[in-house]
Each structure stands twice: as structure tokens, then as C-alpha cells.
Amino acid sequence: MPSYRAPIRDFQFALKEWLEVEKYQGKMKGFEDLSLIDTILEQGGIFCEEVLQPLNVVGDTQGLKLERGADGYNKVHLPDGFIDAYKQYVDNGWGGFSCDTEYGGQGLPNVVNAPVIEMICSANLGFGLMPGLTHGAYTAIHLFGTDEQKQKYLPKMTSGEWTGVMCLTEPGAGTDLGLMTTRAEPNGDGSYNITGSKIFISCGEHEAAPNIVHLILARLPGAPEGVKGISLFVASKFEVNADGSIGERNKVNCGALEHKMGIHATPTCVMNYDGAKAWLVGEPNKGMRGMFAMMNEARLLVGMQGLGIGEVSYQNALLYAKERLQGRGLNGAKFPDKKADPITVHPDVRRMLLSMRAFTEGGRILSLWAALNIDIMHKSEDETERKEAEDFIALITPIVKSYLTGQGTQTAHTGMQVLGGYGYIKDYGMEQFLRDCRITEIYEGTNGVQALDLVGRKLPMGTGRLLRRFFHPAQAFVDDNKNDEKMAEFTKPFYAGLKSLRQASLWIAQKSLSNREEAGAASVDYQTMFSLVVIGYIWARSAQIAMKALEGGSTEKAFYETKIATARFFLNRVLPEHYGLLAKITAGAKMLDIPDIDAA
């Protein structure tokens, strides 16, 4: 059976040493008492290890059951133990950590809440989608809802008593939401009747909570064509009375469950709205603003899903590799007292394990770096600081989503390879990690769409203003350390990657002026290069922090030496992929011509 242990020490390194979050104590709302960090990490780890992780295989094996209720509406039954686990999640207050105190939340920083999200995703991704989606729906109402709507829905969503979902996708209208047909008819009393169907709605129906709040995209009568005619509405499974109690059943029904490759414990629903009563959120025909608020948060969450799966895959691969005896070291037996050496002595196994570790530990800092900037964007009293953080989040969101999910899947794949034939067997759990993670590259905007966003919107914005949010600190780091010989093995390969990224950025910007397809053709390779360089920066700085800790006499010698070894591996064995990516980018769009397809 697979296992999981919360990586508490690595979270501490990322938060306290790399991000130095404690320097913000008392300087922003929610940062008043950061001494809570260790307690939150420890208690979150216990909940995930002892409550959620044991249910992961249960959820995958049992799956879900859809049956028609006596009231004529379909019900979704969750796997054994999931309702009780969700009740514990609610009772312990985990859902309201970063929510507004006005609605019952604790108002803690996102950067403190993010480790809990990662741990949940590692322990049980099928469970983790429910609270994650609730927070996305909470965010849309919090930003764009009326005061009445906020009072009506947010306290119950903050506590977790009610859950929330995003209802965007329709058959034939996925990424191109302008094609959607769900309509909203006004009733004359301020409410609307929603009619239409949505597909791929995660957690659209279940019995873990007595009510589910739906954020729905639909068209008003006479709305403009395309995305300019989309409005956002809120409805709920049961209507809500004036006193906040649950009222009559709304005309919201789960028509079917999708049968999926992975995340078997998450109900992925076809939702039918047959004149469901709903209320407009925000302005008419301005629903894309609310949608993007949910989607951007969801993209960062999905990135952490990939990271979480990568972490648990690495842990189980490492545990197996240390115990599995097979062959002898190439230079002779390392453990002559045993019948064979553990497979960790073999260079290729070490390469695989290092690649997994480099991703998870580097990706963890990336996700927390993003979370900290979300806090700064919303809570800093310095307008310039807020704007710079907003720019950074705009730039880094497609990178977080694409890199952490793509590499999460690759890490699960690598973990399976470490286990060999046993990785293909259900008992060891590795094949479930791979199946569960694969969806993260697809939903909330495929990774290819993230790449188009990066090159089509983020790269040219403000004549490269967003790029400077990364390029400037990265170059400053190189300049500050160029004369430090101890850092040369880290800074030199990083600077080479940074130069390639600048070359690629300039090439795409220039070529796209005459042919926009050049940006599209280069987009995925550019996004990959950007991701590698960002992680290269993270590892170069990590090496510097580790060396200073050792020079200062730290007693955690093995911890910091491992940081340095992993940084050395990533910067010299992984980051040099930027050379090949630059060659592919500058080969141009003409390499993608396919005559027989074009002729068709």
C-alpha cells in the first residue's frame, strides 16, 4: 500500500528561508501572527496522513454511485469514509483559513494556507477537489456579488457547511466559451431562470454537504454574440430562505456521471438546469470577469494538485528504491553484507529520483511564491508593491499551472518506472497517482492554452512589463553573485538559461509582428523554457541559502547538503534543455506545415 508523510521541514525551508515570510509579520492584514505556521503545518499533516491518505485507495476502488431519489432528482453517493472525512475537515475549520473574517473565516494568508492544499492533494486528490472548488466559487461571489449575495452564501461556504462549483463547460463549448448556449430568462423580480446543460462539472452533486452553490455562465436575452454576451449567475441545489435556511429544491439535477481514467472519488457530473432559479452576479454581459477570478485561482490550485501528486509519487519511489535489492554497484558492491545492493546505487535510478526531488522541492517554492504574491496583491498598503505583485501573478499563473501539472504527471510516470513491474501493479499505488494526475494537464485550461496565454497575452503586455517582474530579480541575483566562486557552478548555468529565455522572448516578439502563428508555434516550447529558467532561479537561490546555513554551523548538515546536491543536478542536468528548446522555437512555424491536412 502507498504511504504519505507531510514534508514539514521542506515547507519550513520554503516559507521561512527562501520566501522569508516572517519579514511581513505585522505589515499586512492576516500576517499579524506567523508563529502559527508550524502548528498549521503539523496539524494539517496529521489530518492528511491519518484521515485522508487511508481513503485514497478506497475512493479509487469503490468510485461513485448515481441513483434516482424519491424526489425525482439523482443523487451521488461518495465512497465509504468520504462524508465523515469531509465533516472532520469542516469541524476542524480548514476550509475557512484564508477566507474573510467578516464571513467567519480566519483571514490567514494564502501563503500559509497553500501548504495545506498541497498536502491534501498528495494525500487524496479525489477528496481535495471539493474544498478547492468551493473556494473558487467563494472568491467569485466575494469579488463580484452583491452584499445580499455575500451574506446569503459566503458564511456557509466559508465554514464548508455548503460547497460550491464552477459551471462553465458545455458540449462543444470548452475553451471557446463564446459558443455556449445556456440561457437565462428574467422573472421580473430580480431572479432568472437558467436553462441548459453543463458538462465536466466536478463535485456538481454529492451528499457531503446539504447544499451546493453553483456559479453558472449563461446568456441573457438579446446578449451580444461570443464572450461579450456571457453573464455570471449564482444558483443553489436548494433555494435559500431569507433567514439563511434551506428552502425548496431548485431545478438543478445531475443527469449523469462521467466514467474517468482517474480521480474516481470525484463526481464529474453532467448538470441539467431546467428553469433553475438564479441571481445575476456582477454586471450583465460581464460574466467573464467573474469567470476569470475563479479560473485563475483554479489554475493555481490545479498546479498544486500536480505538485501534490509529484510529492507522494517521489516519496513512494524513494522508499521502494531504498529497500529493493537488485544487482551490484558498477564499481563493486556497496553493501557486500547483503545479497545485492539497493537499486539506489545505480546511476539511472539516482537520476530518476533526483529529477523527482528537483521538481517537487523547486515546484513547492514556485507555488508558495505565487501564493505570497497573491497576498501582497490584495493586502499590501504599498500601491507599487501591489501592482508589481499583480503583474507577477499574471505572468506566473500559466507557468504554475502548466509546469506543475506536466511535471507532476511526468514525476508519477518516473515513479512508476523506479518500481519497475511493481509500479504497474495496483497494490503499490503508483499507477493510481499517474491516472489521477493526468487530468490536471487538461482541465481549467489545457497546458497548451496556458502556453498561448503566456505568449499571446503576457509576453507583449505593457511592452514586456510583466516579463520584467521575473527578469529583473533574476539578473540582479546573477550580478550579485558573479564574483562568488563557490556559487559559479550554480550561477553560470542559470545565466545561460536566462540568456536563452531572453533570446526566445525577443525572437517571438519580433516574428509575431508579421506572422502571429510564430507565437502559437513556439508557445509550448517557450512555456517549457520559461518554467525551467524560473525553477533554475529557485534552485540557484536555494543552493546559496543552503551554503550559508552550513557555513553558519547548522546542525542539519544532511538536509542542506541534499539541497545543494539537488540544485547542482537541476542546474547542470535539467536546465540545459533550454538550448534545444531555443533551437525548436527559432525553427519557426513553417515546421508545422502539413500539406494533406491543409488541403482537406
Image: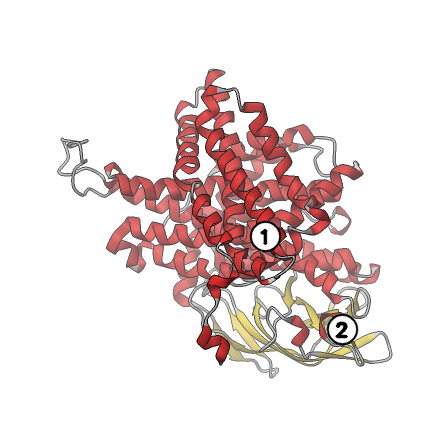
Residue assigned mark 1: 508
List the single residue furthest toward the right: 188
Residue assigned mark 2: 229
Name which residue lies at 42% across and 48% down: 312
Looking at the rendered image, the disc whose residue lies closer to the viewer, 1 or 2, is 1
Q: Residues within 10 Å of mark 1 (few under 14, many from 20)?
A: many
Image mark count: 2
Q: CA distance from mark 1 to mark 2?
A: 32 Å
**Residue 337 image point, x, y percent:** 14, 31
444 with respect to 486 (left or right) = right
**Residue 344 image point, x, y percent:** 27, 38
Q: Foreground residue, 120 or 239?
A: 120
Check disc 2 and give the amino acid type: Gly
**Residue 15 image point, x, y percent:** 57, 34
Q: Foreground residue, 268 or 179?
A: 179
User: How has the structure been colored for display?
Assistant: secondary structure
Q: Residues within 10 Å of mark 2 (few under 14, many from 20)?
A: some
Name which residue lies at 72% across and 59% down: 140
Q: Secondary structure at mark 2?
A: helix
Q: Is residue 467 above or below residue 486?
A: below
Q: Is residue 218 above or below residue 385?
A: below
- Quarter of the image where one finds residue 272: bottom right
> Residue 465 got which mark?
none
Confirm whether residue 6 shows in the render: no
Name which residue lies at 62% across and 40% down: 470
Q: Is residue 432 above or below residue 499?
A: below
